[in-house]
Amino acid sequence: MDDVREDIVIRVRGLVTRFGHQTVHDGLDLDVRRGEVMGVVGGSGTGKSVLLRAIVGLKRPDAGEIDVLGRNLWRQSEAEARELERRWGVLFQDGALFSSLTVMQNIEVPLREHCPMPAPLMDEIAACKIALVGLPEESGDKFPAQLSGGMRKRAGLARALALDPEILFLDEPTAGLDPIAATDFDRLIGDLKGSLGLTVFLVTHDLDTLYAICDRIAVLVGGRIRVGTLAQHLQDPDPWFQAYFHGPRARAALPPGIPLTPSSPPLADRPG
Amino acid sequence: MAPLASIFAVEERGAIVLRAEGSWLVAAAEQIDSRLRALRLPEGKQVRFDLAGVDRLDTAGAWLVLRTEQALTARGNEVAVTGVRASFAPLIAQLRAHGAVSPRPHPIPPHHTFIGFLARLGEVTALVLHRGYTMLGFGGLVFATIARLPLRPGRLRLTAAVVQMEQTGLDAMPIVGLLSFLIGVVMAYQGADQLRRFGAEIYTVNLLGIAVLRELGVLLAAIIIAGRSGSAFTAQIGTMQINQEIDALHTLGLDPIEVLVLPRLFGLVVTLPLLVFYADAMGLLGGCLMTWGILGINVPTFLDQLRGAITQGTLWIGVIKAPFFAAIIAMVGCHEGFNVTGSADSVGRLTTQSVVESIFLVIVADAAFSILFSLLHV
């Protein structure tokens, strides 16, 4: 969608984040390529959400560089920052919809702010996004408190997509959804990625999501990150990887056709 | 600033060709929209919508394409969308599948009609009455819990009550003291200014003594505490309500009234009278310094005059009201906290409401006390 054909849209180098004396990220490197779905996993407290917050500029890193779409977050002017912000969309855990506005008005907030346009057109575009994320038409006039958790997430997604961003950040998009809603949501993300050409940065605990839509998986362990395809992670002898990717839940979620045992040889040279 | 996008209509061999070019992005949506609206749409013709010149397309652009297509079809044209790049095809297909709808007109908010206004009026009245009813119920519940207390005195959580006393009493001393002092100063200044005209400036002291001890000290302290602690009660209990902590208490066999309300109630009932006494002292101190400064009434003269103006009863009339005001503030604060439902939004709303309500009730109660005292001739 962009003229600049840079391959890496998010580049993190040597990221260090601390809370008091506790170091969460200790020299973390990460590249996210254009058009891929990058899943970020890790145990509780390993700083998955903090990483997301650092990349979108909500948490200033204690050391290290973060470039998004070729721009350094902390070395750009106000105008450049605004320009960058309209090129990404963020879906927070519970949607983070503005509770005093209707769903429609929520979606119109970024439109109003970044692309002033007549109200009827804005309503049309907002209605379009509402339909696109699979919400019923009449939910546009509802307030967030009147929606179920799953609908709030969809509405949050519609707001994140309001400006047709290049990168979509999702923080635990399927947490708290029932299995059917979660599967639908995975499918929705997959569809949108295909039609809008999105790059997706996805923090999740949901193994089904991980297997269903992620191209590569970044695993946060001990303040560092290890990136690879699912097949590569399945091979990893590290006990945490074994427990995570070979636990009973992982087995249940694993798509058919991928052998489970880490020792099975053909996987080693399977391309990512 | 906005990327260039355009649309032309040309006629080719009897068919009409709409040729779209440039970047059909949300940033250019306004521009494209106004051009599309300016086009005079044909009727009953063959129309080809040619997108070959479109190099970038997003949802907004795709919507505008589909909207135009729909409008053309509705006028009996035969429409074909052509020249769609392979990379745009999935977006258009997906939008066509579930996105291509015109927004419904916003419903007129019901309170914008006369009937709606009446309905709203009725609703609000019913709401106020209902709130009074539930408040009464809550009061009854709390008193029933207190009445059971002598049977099992161990149920009163003393530690929690002492913590509340510290937070609502001790921590409020700087602000209550400072404000009472300043009110004393202001009263003395205004009183002296008026009374000097009659050569009765010495009666400034009487004015101060009566006003501060009977009304100002207790009202000021109660209003500050309503704003400071009543709101805190609502916010604390409301947040617990949202976190389902109240439900957790129930399931653990604990009575939220006992655990949350009684310590706050007892803490405030004990500390507010003490705060009132302190506010009275600070108010008189402020008045004393001010009369000294502008009228030259020195401290011994001030005290002499004060002794003549007030009795112990004057002090007690003020202080006696404090426990009642404290009970009102604590009950309203806790009750509104329990009323919190759903979102964090309601914590804020009910906190505001709790402060307004408790100040309102405190002043109403003060008026009732005035009537009572005048009937009793005190």
Image (spheres, coloured by chain):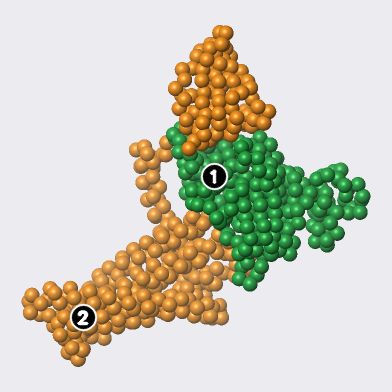
The residue positioned 63% from the left and 72% from the top of the image is: A21
Q: Pointer 1: what residue?
A: A86
**Residue A1, picture quadrant:** top right
Q: Amino acid at mark 1?
A: Arg
- Coordinates of residue A49 in the picture (x, y in percent): 64, 57
Q: Pointer 2: what residue?
A: B290
- Give the chain of mark 2: B
The hue in which chain A appears in the rendered picture of the protein: green
Tell me, yes or no, if residue A34 can be seen here.
yes
- Coordinates of residue B366 in the picture (x, y in percent): 30, 70
Label 2 SS: helix
Q: Pointers 2 and 1 in contact (CB under 8 A)?
A: no
The residue positioned 61% from the left and 48% from the top of the image is: A70
Outermost left residue: B198
- Coordinates of residue A131 in the picture (x, y in percent): 59, 35
Who's orange, chain-wise? Answer: B
**Residue B313, picture quadrant:** bottom left
User: Is B367 situated left or right of B117 in this image?
Assistant: left
- Give the chain of mark 1: A
- Coordinates of residue A148 in the picture (x, y in percent): 59, 47
How far, Cα to Cα, is label 2 from label 1? 60 Å
> Mark 2 and mark 1, same subunit?
no
User: Is B153 situated left or right of B139 in this image?
Assistant: right
Judging depth in this view, the residue of B322 and A198 nearest the camera is: A198
Label 1 SS: loop
Name above or below for residue B308 compared with residue B375: below
The number of numbered discs placed on residues in the rendered structure image is 2
Judge the density around disc 1: few (<14), some (14-19), many (≥20) Cα neighbours within 10 Å: many
Tell me, yes or no, if residue A149 can be seen here.
no
Judging depth in this view, the residue of B347 and A29 nearest the camera is: A29
